[in-house]
């Protein structure tokens, strides 16, 4: 990315690439107190241009990009003394987070009559982990200590309607996945879709109390009490009522999806949820989805499509 391309981007998004904004990011991170050759504006634009135009593997790549972009003769030692600090890392993190938040636009939506039209946001929570050099086991311990003692995880929150991430975290691969879910108080009018690793009933209870919506894959090994059961065509399955889930494995219908009203007890509080079962003929297994939305607001077919 050259000066012309970056100028076009800066003109398109002036509230993101403005000098006052980048200076505020540097001030917040306590970076560049003495603004000489390296200022928050110059460094922010140079980092953006370098990352957008070439692979970056070392600090020397940023140094060469900064010199080429601004035409300076700053030495590598002087550049490294400013950049290779925790304050610079905090400045870059804050700058990137604000750009991700400010440059996203809603590119998808639903008609007013659709089931998801009332939702302000649909969040997709996922993550991945990878092993790193064993010498970092003290800093980034992994869960599989015998095979790979050092590993990092990358929990990510994605805004489906904007087709862009909202939060990306790099962390040692030891904290539990629900730790990185968005705060319950920020999810009013928003739907969270996540895998079974993010299932935590206390957290889901707080989301429901704050007016949020969740749709999660259910974990195997949980056997709540089934209160009622309905097939996809609306017929009530009386033979499945008032039984633990593990006791109705054989009579579960496979030709149609089934919605079970289940009740679980956790921390002295009883919670009523909907557990939807859909048979997958390819894998010969049931897919289980958990939500708290009532049938009138989220039909079984709509939830399974989601």
Image (cartoon, helix red, strand yellow):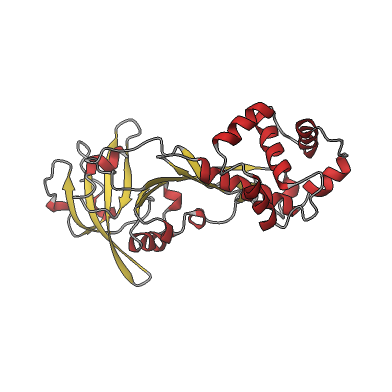
Quarter occupied by residue 111: top left
Q: Is residue 287 above or below residue 281?
A: below
For the N terminus, the image quarter is: top right
Q: Would residue 149 be seen by someone viewing this image from the given angle?
A: no
Residue 160 picture location, percent across and down: 41, 40
Provide residue 23's location: percent of width, then percent of height.
68, 50
Residue drawn 81% across the image and 32% down it: 71
Which residue sits at x=45%, y=37%?
163
- For the view shown, which residue lies furthest in the bottom direction? 268
Of the pair 83 and 303, the residue shown nearer to us: 83
Viewed as shown, does residue 235 lie left or right of 221?
A: left
Residue 246 sits in quarter: bottom left
Residue 31 in the image, given as x and y percentages of width and height: 74, 54
At x 26%, y 53%, the residue is 293
Res 223 quadrant in image:
bottom left
**Left or right placement of residue 239 versus residue 198 in this view:** left
Q: Disc count in the image?
A: 0
Q: Determine whether 42 is above or below 186 in the image.
A: above
Question: Would residue 178 be visible to someone looking at this image?
Answer: yes
- Quadrant of the snapshot with the C terminus: top left
Question: Could you tell me residue 236's position as x and y percent?
Answer: 12, 49
């Amino acid at each position: 990315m050259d000066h012309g391309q970056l100028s076009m981007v800066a003109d398109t998004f002036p509230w993101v690439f403005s000098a006052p904004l980048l200076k505020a990011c540097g001030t917040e991170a306590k970076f560049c107190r003495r603004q000489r050759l390296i200022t928050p504006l110059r460094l922010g634009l140079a980092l953006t241009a370098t990352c957008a135009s070439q692979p970056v593997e070392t600090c020397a790549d940023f140094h060469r990009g900064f010199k080429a972009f601004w035409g300076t003769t700053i030495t590598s030692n002087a550049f490294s003394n400013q950049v290779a600090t925790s304050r610079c890392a905090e400045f870059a993190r804050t700058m990137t987070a604000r750009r991700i938040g400010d440059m996203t636009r809603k590119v998808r939506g639903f008609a007013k009559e659709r089931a998801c039209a009332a939702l302000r946001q649909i969040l997709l929570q996922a993550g991945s982990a990878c092993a790193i050099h064993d010498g970092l086991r003290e800093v980034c311990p992994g869960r599989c200590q015998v095979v790979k003692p050092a590993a990092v995880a990358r929990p990510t929150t994605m805004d489906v309607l904007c087709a862009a991430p909202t939060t990306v975290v790099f962390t040692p691969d030891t904290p539990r996945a629900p730790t990185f879910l968005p705060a319950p108080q920020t999810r009013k009018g928003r739907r969270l879709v996540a895998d079974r690793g993010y299932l935590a009933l206390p957290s889901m209870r707080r989301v429901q109390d704050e007016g949020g919506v969740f749709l999660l894959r259910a974990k195997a090994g949980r056997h709540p009490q089934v209160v009622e059961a309905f097939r996809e065509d609306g017929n009530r399955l009386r033979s499945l009522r008032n039984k633990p889930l593990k006791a109705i494995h054989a009579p579960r219908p496979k030709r149609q999806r089934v919605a079970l009203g289940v009740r679980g007890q956790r921390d002295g509080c009883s919670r009523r949820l909907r557990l939807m079962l859909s048979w997958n003929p390819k894998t010969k297994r049931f897919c289980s989805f958990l939500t708290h939305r009532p049938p009138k607001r989220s039909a079984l077919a709509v939830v399974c499509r989601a």
